[in-house]
């Protein structure tokens, strides 16, 4: 908690306000020219606005909570991932942010890019927000208090048949290690479900699961900043998260599943 302007503001309220400010800046920036750079490969890109937005979010959190640790995707990329992974479990107040989840959408002026902010407490996700600037949708959740979209409470789909389900996945930027696997999985899953969507943001996919718009989402090679906020959204809406093989040095999940409990189980049975 923090007193700002004479008012007691919760961690969740702070996260919502900061995400909204960052998203508003992105919605304005996407209409203009901006610089694009390469991270690991031509499939993994970063813009000047990934870095600017991360700095804005870090600055805002630090203004309110100067003693909290803030870990962002771009700062992790240029620093020791190993030490960050240990710190997440050791500290009470750790914020993990993805300034633009769906950078390729942003670069191509497509909807679906999001701002993702999560707070951890000794390794446990305490709260998360996923903000979609294009349609002003603010997804938020706090441990034990439910998940919400613009203050309306969310619940996952009650669909229990995979063949009647709308699913989503993504194309990992790590082509060499993960993309071929995802393509094989799509071939399997698409024959068993109603349809598969790819919106380009793992955080948004998880938020859509929480809202009941999708029955489940899966992807390989996701990092913790991609799905931390979406993870708690899905669970607080009554859904389930499963993963296989977490690499603490890379803070990366080999396989990540998020859905309503029955469809998640059926999806894993098909893929794994």
Image: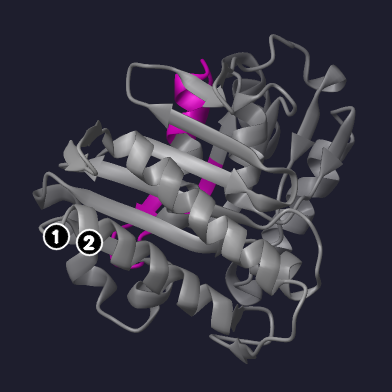
Residue at 60% over, 72% down: 174
Question: Which of the image's four quarters has the N terminus?
Answer: top left
Percent position (x, y) of residue 12?
Answer: 35, 35
Residue beneath label 2, please? 62
Say whether residue 238 is visible. Answer: yes
Is residue 25 rendered to the left or right of residue 97? right
Query: The residue tagged with tag 2: helix, strand or loop?
Result: helix
Give yes or no for contact between labels 1 and 2 (Cβ–Cβ under 8 Å): yes
The quarter holding residue 259 reads top right
Q: Which residues are magenta?
A: 232-256
Does residue 245 show up magenta in the picture? Answer: yes
Is residue 211 rendered to the left or right of residue 95? right
Say whether residue 254 is visible. Answer: no
Does residue 157 show up magenta in the picture? Answer: no
Q: Kindly report the distance in space between the C-alpha atoms of the residues bearing marks 1 and 2.
A: 4 Å
Percent position (x, y) of residue 114?
Answer: 61, 54
């Amino acid at each position: 908690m923090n007193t700002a302007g004479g008012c007691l503001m919760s961690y969740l309220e702070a996260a919502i306000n900061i995400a909204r400010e960052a998203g508003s800046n992105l919605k304005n920036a996407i209409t203009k020219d901006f610089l694009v750079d390469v991270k690991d490969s031509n499939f993994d890109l970063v813009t000047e606005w990934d870095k600017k937005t991360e700095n804005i979010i870090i600055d805002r959190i630090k203004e309110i909570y100067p003693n909290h640790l803030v870990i962002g995707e771009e700062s992790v990329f240029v620093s020791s991932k190993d030490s960050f992974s240990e710190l997440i479990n050791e500290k009470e107040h750790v914020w993990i942010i993805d300034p633009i989840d769906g950078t390729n959408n942003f670069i191509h002026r497509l909807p679906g890019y999001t701002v993702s902010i999560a707070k951890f407490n000794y390794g446990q996700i305490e709260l998360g927000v996923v903000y979609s600037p294009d349609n002003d949708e603010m997804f938020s959740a706090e441990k034990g208090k439910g998940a919400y979209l613009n203050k309306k409470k969310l619940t996952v789909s009650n669909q229990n048949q995979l063949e009647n389900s709308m699913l989503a996945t993504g194309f990992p930027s790590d082509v060499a290690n993960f993309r071929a696997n995802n393509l094989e999985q799509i071939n399997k899953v698409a024959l068993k479900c109603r349809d598969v969507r790819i919106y380009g943001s793992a955080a948004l996919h998880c938020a859509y699961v929480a809202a009941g718009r999708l029955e489940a989402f899966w992807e390989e090679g996701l990092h913790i900043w991609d799905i931390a906020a979406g993870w708690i959204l899905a669970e607080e809406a009554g859904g389930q998260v499963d993963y296989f093989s977490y690499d603490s040095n890379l803070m990366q999940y080999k396989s990540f599943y998020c859905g309503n409990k029955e469809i998640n189980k059926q999806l894993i049975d098909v893929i794994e």
